[in-house]
Image (spheres, rainbow, N blue to C red):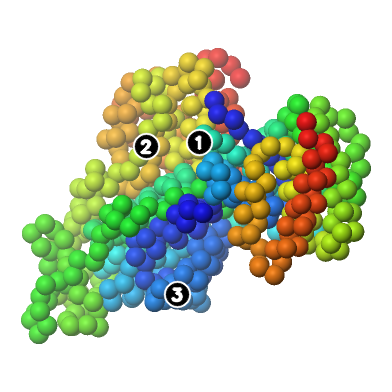
Amino acid sequence: MSERIRMVFSGSGGQGVITAAIILAEAAVIYEGKNATQSQSYGAAARGGSTRSDIIISDGEINFPEVTQPNILVCLTEEAYTTYSPIIRPGGTLLTDSRFVQITRKVDARQVELPMYETVMEKIGKPVVFNICVLGALLGLTEILKPESVMAAIADRVPKDFLTMNNRAFDLGLVLGAQFRK
Amino acid sequence: MNKKVRFLQGNEACVEGAIYAGVDFFAGYPITPSTEIAERLSEYLPQRGGKFIQMEDEIASMCAIIGASLTGKKVMTATSGPGFSLKQEAIGYACMAEIPCVIANVQRGGPSTGNPTHVSQGDINQARWGTHGDHSIIALTASNHQDVFKMTVDAFNMAETYRTPVILLFDEVIGHMREKLVIPEEGELEIVDRLRTSVPKDVDYHPYLPREDGRLPMSDFGGEHRYNVTGLFHDMWGFPSNNPKIVNELLRHLVDKIDNNVQAITRYKEHCLEGAEYILVSYGSSARSAIHLAQNRRNKGEKIGVLELQSLWPFPTELVREKCARAKAVLVVEMNMGQVLTQVKAAVDNPDRVFLANRIDGKLITPSDIKRLLRVIQGRGV
């Protein structure tokens, strides 16, 4: 069976969790010729509500699009962390932001806590690119896709005037994540 | 970057299919979870010389596409449960007046306003019998974006071929999920264009006089010929009639033109079906869970296969009977109280061996849900 990466991105509405999930899955399909699905729970929740997006990336066919046990879990709020950390696949990777999440639970996973929000605010000063920094960190930490593929997908989605800022956020994330690469 | 490879929502894949098929006109009233179809077409259609109209409600939208189709345009609308209910009267009119049109229903939980943001497959029977009176209808569905594209193209083709409304029965999971779509090259898929009359201007044109092959060539309304269109039973001129012979012949024609072509209309896929002892019959997003389970169990040596239906109406009775003939048991996997189950039971020789694996709580049925039921049927316990 071909390699299959199952991911859950979680946080609160307005953090760009869904956008980050779409960019990552799109990069896999468009720039690396893989298959990917991205889905999310729809509800009345928007800014401030809790959000979750499931992403599966695979060289093979993907049928059931939901993730029950993620290899990679990203939690950007305390609530998301409490809700989803128990479902991580044993030996998986759990990425949290140190500003928003206090790690309390002991889970059978590699827990990586990074100051992504603080770094973005300190070096760029715009919280809008926080999600792109998270993507950078994830790509620094793991080898899901080539960073160039994700950067190309970002360039497709982001207005030209904001591209430099987004690339910078992505690079900051990459450096943060790379320190913990296995 | 390959422009033909896209990563998009099922609703957007439907739009891409409609554009490929040559859609000229869309009228609709946005409703979750179908809104992206209207949204994307509101952008595309004006760019390519087409028309997009957001109407005051769903009934008006249905009436608008009927009118536009008569003038020679390829038309569609999109909705979900509550809107689909409202469109029914005009769908009946399109059946009676034989007007090609495509209606996408991205299913959500019902009845009434129900469960707007969650998945359901509860409108299967409504697609068949939502409008009153004897008639036949075509309804297509799909479980992935490549097939959403293809079924949308087929829907436009069948609407033209049979001069009938064609229903696209998608669901919330397919509509909102994003995955890959490879847009076929021009000419790769067949496109059926409007069959127009060869009767010249100023010569009598009979709008409802079939050719030898049974097809009815159309004349763009408001163009070269004057003719009548009505929801009443009508003669070859399109004028109302209650002559028993005319009523009898027209009703038979409306049913036969579709039911006699069930083989040509049938669309399906087989997954691990060869030598399967247990067959899962499914469609739409629930088929994804069924296929997931079948492939998984096949790797472990279990003989489980999936018959994925892509055309639900006219129901492919013969196909289901033939494919399920040697199965120890058949499990119909759907997200309703057994709407396709009834059809499958009626199709097979041994209906007592047909079971329902369903979920109706707004969540996508999972491979584990199906596996649990299958184990019980197999006598292996949960």
The reply to whether the C-beta atoms of the residues labelled 2 and 3 are less than 8 Å apart is no
Residue under the point 61% across and 40% down: A56
Q: Pointer 1: what residue?
A: A61
**Where's the C terminus of chain B, which quadrant?**
top right
**Residue at point 54% right, 41% down?**
A34
Chain ID of residue with mark 2: B
Identify residue type, mark 1.
Answer: Glu
- Can residue B90 be seen in the rendering of this structure? no
Total number of numbered discs in the rendering: 3
Q: Position of residue B313 (x, y in %)?
A: 34, 48
SS for callout 3: helix
The answer as to whether the residues below labels 1 and 3 share one chain is no
Farthest residue to the bottom: give it: B202
Q: Is residue B99 above or below residue A25?
A: below
Task: Describe residue A41's horizontal placement relative to residue B304 as left or right.
Answer: right
The Cα atoms of the two marked residues, 2 and 3, are separated by: 36 Å
> Could you tell me which residue is drawn at 82 percent across and 36 percent down?
A180
Dividing the picture into quadrants, the one containing residue B238 is bottom left
Q: Secondary structure at mark 2?
A: strand
Say whether residue B191 is visible: yes
Q: Is residue A133 left or right of residue B360?
A: right
Q: Is residue B129 left or right of residue B190?
A: right
Q: Residue B85: x percent and y percent?
A: 47, 61
Residue behind mark 2: B269
Q: Of residues B362 and A89, which is closer to you in this image?
A: A89
